[in-house]
């Protein structure tokens, strides 16, 4: 019964999404107040029904209703409770339901938090979000119904893919989706203002906190995914430039550009049509990511063509949303005709523009590399692979260039700055950064790969330069008067530096030994002695495993005990590798067991990965910086006006 | 959800328990090198070659038996003194460009390799024009009614 209620709730949510789209958009266009007023209740109603549908599916998983096809395929009575709940979004249908539920939550948040906006404008934002939501609900109901039944019911489920039975699945998808679906709000704002024909600084100020919150979630979501892959996949990699990863990275890059361009539009009223285009682009890339991941096109263009129902639908939706909004942009953006202010080549405006050019080029390059093999195959030019070597050689120089510009952007003045003054302000920072970066680089890097040396110098430059830029501003206003936005910027930029250190050092100084180890044998890696002391059988809730005990010592002193496992999951008969990791800020010790070889010895991979944790620490600092910035009084003032009774968009977004 | 795409890892078909019991010969044998340069060459190669039957993995990471065979092939060629280019050429000859994660530069990939530089160039040019358009004619005083757009 509950699944039918869920199905019904989903249908009602689709109906309300249509209502939320049609009435407010038409009403705002025609100036019909009563139609405009439909937006908020419709959005809240849609959100409610989506939550009910989601709860119904989660309930089916928790109680183990194996008459629901989706549950039967992705759960099992032995599956621990937290994974049964997470399995709700563990495969295609459920993850789309999560996607659209989160969109519903964002719509609900906008409905509650938009009282400061002109009613017609808020109605348009919600209307646009309703349109998107309707498209996805139609997709869900027509091609991917998560509540479909199988009769007679299965005795037991086929179990969740063991790779997904991890805390990573519990946290990563909801947070990641909250991030990239959150760009729907900025997208709604952009389309609404194109329809409205108005785009002023107030617009940018409204859009900023929403964009920031979405960006914070996306940052954390991507970092979690990378961390999950690192410890779960068992070969110590943390980023693979897999199309699925790129699908979430492209909106992040575009969103980062959007944050900077929004700041310029807010503070100086500049680059407005560009900001609109970026807002459209960030969400379009989120949709493209959903298409890439959900259509099967990644496996092969031919696989896509042989079972095209789902793919064609999303492709159509994608074409409609992106094509429609770009057409609207081409038509309306030239008519925005805003009054603009001047600035000189040496100014913060110019540097932010350079930031946007580089971030946009990075986004487009990742896009190019991701879709190029698909295009080449579709055009019948053969099959090629575009992988890490390509992305690294394209992305790393762009990232370093962006890093070099960062402190300059924080140090330069608005409108017009003097090149001599700017040089004078940053020259000591640059010198200090070179010394610190080179000293650190040569101390920790093994091969002294030049890219990594440049990386550590750039990281030092970001830290020292940003700190000096903050100090310079504090000289004028006093430290206590620096705004939260400025502090947030400082912390987020520090995060970029920390992440660069992590990437540069772990890429060049990591050591790996692939060795045959019998029980009692040792292997030395970078001064650490790894000894396989024993291998024992252990039993988990739904798997059996052989667990190795690896004692690590350094100069005879014990450092850590690692417990890598080889698991066999009964239901699917799949073997899994669980790495044994001793984490640390300056190094991770990492062991994974391969296969057992002839004579009982194990094929073991032993890694020492210096500073690898800095990658995720840096991402967390970026997110923390975003959080500090979002608490800025500038954004809260709009909220005070709004007289609303609920918490901020952060709290609302956090529900998902 | 990148992990979903990496099912390859989980798809190697035999339970390790069965494997151990039957004493089957595992192919995941670690390789030893007498020449450190060979080892470095081997590691560079296996990181840039694609496991052809996997969703998206290089032959270093993959547990698929094809990847193990390819590793063995690369190992043999490298220890026999073959250059990186020779090994890649041999594999491309058998499997096509699909096996390389670093696509070769040729007419059909020209846009791929030149695209990023082109993007930065065009973007930089547009940005420079925008800056010039916004630059006040005399001094830094604020001018009004400037055409405002980047695109």
Image: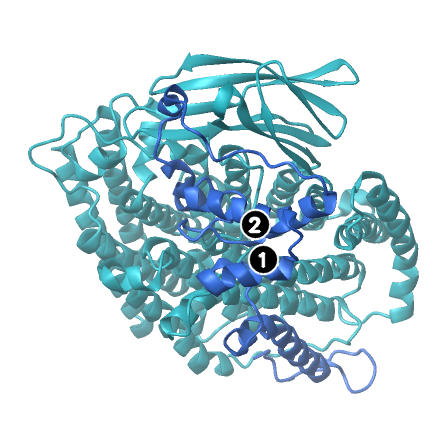
Chain colours: A cyan, B blue
The answer to whether residue A218 is left or right of residue A432 is: left
Image quarter in which the C terminus of chain B is found: bottom right
Q: Are marks 1 and 2 on the same chain?
A: yes
The answer to whether residue A213 is left or right of residue A306 is: right
**Residue that carries the numbered disc 1 in the rendered image:** B87
Q: Chain of mark 2?
A: B
Q: Any mark on residue A78, and which?
A: none
Question: Is residue B59 at least partly visible in the picture?
Answer: no
Determine whether A469 is above or below A566 in the image. below
* Quadrant in which residue A331 is drawn: bottom left
Q: Between A47 and A393, which is closer to the camera in this rendering?
A: A393
User: Which residue is depicted at the point 27% across and 60% down?
Assistant: A135
Q: Chain of mark 1?
A: B
Q: Position of residue A611 (x, y in %)?
A: 71, 37
User: Which residue is depicted at the point 32% across and 56% down?
Assistant: A296
Estimate how packed mark 2 is, as few (under 14), some (14 to 19) or many (20 or more) residues with alpha carbons within 10 Å.
many
Whether tag 1 and tag 2 are in contact, CB under 8 A, the answer is yes
Question: Is residue A390 at least partly visible in the picture?
Answer: yes
Instruction: Give the CA separation, mark 1 to mark 2.
Output: 7 Å
Residue closest to the far bottom = B137
Q: Secondary structure at mark 1?
A: helix
Residue closest to the far front = B80
The answer to whether residue A599 is left or right of residue B77 is: left
Q: Any mark on residue B74, and which?
A: 2
Q: Secondary structure at mark 2?
A: helix
């Amino acid at each position: 019964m509950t699944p039918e209620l869920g199905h019904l709730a989903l249908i009602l949510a689709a109906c309300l999404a249509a209502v939320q789209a049609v009435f407010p958009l038409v009403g705002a266009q025609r100036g019909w107040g009563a139609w405009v007023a439909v937006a908020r209740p419709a959005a809240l109603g849609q959100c409610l029904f989506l939550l009910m549908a989601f709860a119904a599916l989660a309930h089916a998983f928790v109680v183990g209703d194996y008459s629901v096809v989706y549950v039967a395929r992705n759960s099992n009575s032995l599956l621990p409770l937290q994974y049964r709940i997470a399995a709700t979004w563990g495969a295609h249908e459920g993850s789309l339901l999560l996607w659209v539920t989160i969109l519903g939550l964002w719509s609900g948040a906008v409905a509650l938090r938009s009282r400061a906006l002109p009613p017609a404008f808020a109605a348009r934002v919600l209307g646009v979000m309703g349109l998107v939501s309707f498209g996805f609900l139609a997709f869900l109901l027509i091609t991917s119904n998560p509540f479909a039944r199988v009769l007679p019911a299965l005795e037991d489920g086929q179990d969740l893919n063991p790779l997904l039975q991890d805390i990573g699945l519990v946290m990563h998808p909801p947070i990641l989706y909250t991030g990239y679906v959150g760009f729907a709000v900025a997208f709604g704002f952009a389309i609404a203002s194109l329809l409205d024909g108005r785009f002023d600084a107030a617009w940018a100020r409204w859009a900023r906190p929403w964009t920031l919150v979405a960006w914070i979630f996306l940052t954390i979501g991507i970092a979690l995914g990378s961390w999950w892959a690192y410890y779960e996949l068992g070969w110590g990699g943390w980023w693979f430039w897999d199309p699925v990863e790129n699908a979430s990275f492209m909106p992040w890059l575009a969103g980062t550009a959007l944050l900077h361009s929004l700041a310029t539009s807010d503070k100086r009223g500049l680059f407005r049509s560009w900001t609109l285009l970026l807002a459209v682009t960030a969400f379009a890339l989120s949709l493209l990511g959903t298409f890439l991941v959900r259509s099967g096109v990644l496996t092969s263009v031919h696989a896509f063509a042989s079972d095209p129902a789902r793919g064609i639908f999303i492709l159509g939706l994608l074409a409609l949303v992106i094509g429609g909004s770009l057409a609207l942009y081409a038509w309306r953006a030239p008519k925005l005709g805003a009054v603009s202010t001047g600035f000189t080549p040496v100014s913060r405006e110019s540097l932010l523009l350079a930031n946007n050019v580089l971030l946009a080029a990075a986004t487009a390059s990742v896009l190019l590399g991701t879709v190029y093999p698909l295009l080449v195959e579709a055009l019948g030019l053969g099959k090629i692979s575009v992988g890490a070597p390509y992305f690294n050689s394209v992305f790393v120089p762009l990232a370093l260039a962006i890093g070099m510009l960062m402190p300059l952007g924080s140090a330069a003045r608005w409108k017009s700055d003097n090149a001599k003054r700017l040089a004078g302000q940053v020259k000591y920072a640059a010198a200090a950064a070179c010394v610190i970066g080179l000293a650190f680089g040569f101390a920790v890097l093994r091969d002294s790969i030049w890219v990594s040396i440049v990386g550590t110098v750039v990281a030092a430059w970001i830290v020292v330069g940003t700190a000096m830029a903050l100090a310079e501003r504090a000289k004028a206003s006093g430290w206590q008067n620096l705004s939260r936005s400025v502090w947030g910027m400082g912390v987020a930029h520090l995060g970029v530096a920390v992440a660069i250190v992590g990437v540069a050092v772990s890429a060049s100084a990591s050591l790996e030994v692939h060795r045959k180890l019998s029980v009692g044998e040792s292997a030395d890696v970078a001064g650490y002695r790894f000894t396989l002391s024993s291998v024992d059988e252990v039993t988990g809730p739904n798997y059996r495993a052989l667990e190795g005990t690896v004692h690590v010592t350094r100069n005879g002193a014990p450092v850590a005990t690692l417990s890598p496992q080889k698991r066999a999951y009964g239901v699917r008969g799949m073997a899994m590798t669980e790495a044994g990791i001793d984490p640390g800020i300056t190094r991770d010790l990492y062991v994974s067991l391969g296969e057992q070889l002839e004579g009982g010895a194990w094929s073991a991979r032993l890694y020492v990965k210096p500073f690898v944790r800095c990658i995720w620490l840096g991402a967390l600092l970026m997110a923390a910086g975003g959080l500090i910035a979002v608490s800025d009084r500038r954004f809260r003032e709009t909220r005070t006006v709004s007289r609303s009774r609920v918490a901020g968009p952060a709290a609302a977004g956090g529900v998902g | 959800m990148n992990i979903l795409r990496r099912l390859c890892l989980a798809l190697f078909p035999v339970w390790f328990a069965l494997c151990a019991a039957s004493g089957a010969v595992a192919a995941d044998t670690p390789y030893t090198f007498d020449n450190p340069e060979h080892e470095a060459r081997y590691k560079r190669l296996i990181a840039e070659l694609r496991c052809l039957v996997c969703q998206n993995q290089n032959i270093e990471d993959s547990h698929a038996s094809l990847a193990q065979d390819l590793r063995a092939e690369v190992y043999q060629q490298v220890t026999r003194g073959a250059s990186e280019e020779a090994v890649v050429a041999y594999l491309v000859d058998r499997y096509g460009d699909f096996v390389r994660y670093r696509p070769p530069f040729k007419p059909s990939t020209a846009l791929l390799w030149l695209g990023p530089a082109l993007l930065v160039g065009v973007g930089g040019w547009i940005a420079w024009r925008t800056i010039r358009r916004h630059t006040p004619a005399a001094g830094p005083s604020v001018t009004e009614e400037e055409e405002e757009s980047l695109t």
